[in-house]
């Protein structure tokens, strides 16, 4: 399947072919050179668009990886912060009961 180059590409190719035209070169030879230049331009554009797609895919993959790492870090922070406060109330409860019992024993209200 051959895709016909755009009019702009054809004009550019013809300008380049005419600029490099040798004395005694026929119009047919110039047209053949212009067609070769058109093909080169088309191949170059295909390669650049392929590279661009590849870069975009890699960039999207990197963005996904960064967001996953960031969400994993956030999840770890949430789990860590949840575990620490659950111990604190129990420690405070035990300390308050010990303090209360020592107070009662020292004041002589419990024999």
Image (spheres, grey):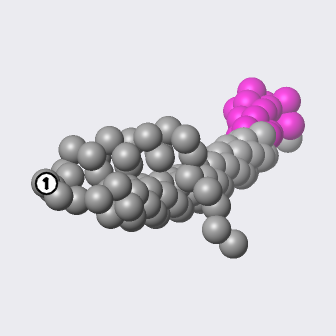
> In this orientation, which residue lies closer to the viewer: 62 or 67?
62
At 17% across and 58% down in the image, what residue appears?
24
Q: Is residue 18 left or right of residue 1?
A: left
- Position of 86 relative to 53 (above/below): above
The answer to if 101 sits in the magenta stretch is yes
- Dominant secondary structure of the magenta stretch? helix
The spot of residue 6 in percent (x, y) is 57, 45
**Is the C terminus in the top left, top right, bottom left or bottom right quadrant?**
top right
- Position of 57 relative to 88 (above/below): below
The spot of residue 79 in percent (x, y) is 71, 52
At 61% across and 56% down in the image, what residue appears?
4
**Is the N terminus in the top left, top right, bottom left or bottom right quadrant?**
bottom right
Residue range in magenta is 92-110
The answer to if 50 sits in the magenta stretch is no
The spot of residue 53 in percent (x, y) is 57, 57
The spot of residue 10 in percent (x, y) is 47, 46
> In this orientation, which residue lies closer to the viewer: 96 or 104?
96
| Residue at the right extreme, as displayed | 110
> In this orientation, which residue lies closer to the viewer: 85 or 37?
37
The answer to whether residue 19 of the structure is visible from this angle is: yes
| Residue at the bottom extreme, as displayed | 1
How many marks do you count on the picture? 1
- Disc 1 designates what residue? 23
Q: Residues within 10 Å of mark 1 (few under 14, many from 20)?
A: few
The answer to whether residue 91 of the structure is visible from this angle is: no
| Residue at the left extreme, as displayed | 23
- The part of the image, by quadrant, that contains residue 106 is top right
- Secondary structure of residue under mark 1: loop
């Amino acid at each position: 399947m051959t895709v016909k180059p755009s009019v702009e590409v054809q004009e550019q190719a013809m300008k380049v072919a005419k600029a490099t035209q040798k004395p005694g070169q026929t119009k047919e030879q110039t047209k053949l050179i212009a067609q070769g230049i058109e093909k080169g331009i088309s191949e170059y554009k295909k390669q650049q668009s392929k590279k661009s797609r590849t870069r975009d895919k890699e960039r999207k993959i990197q963005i996904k990886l960064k967001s996953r790492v960031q969400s994993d870090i956030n999840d770890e922070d949430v789990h860590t912060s949840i575990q620490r406060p659950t111990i604190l109330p129990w420690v405070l409860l035990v300390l308050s009961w010990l303090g209360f019992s020592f107070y009662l024993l020292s004041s002589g209200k419990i024999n």
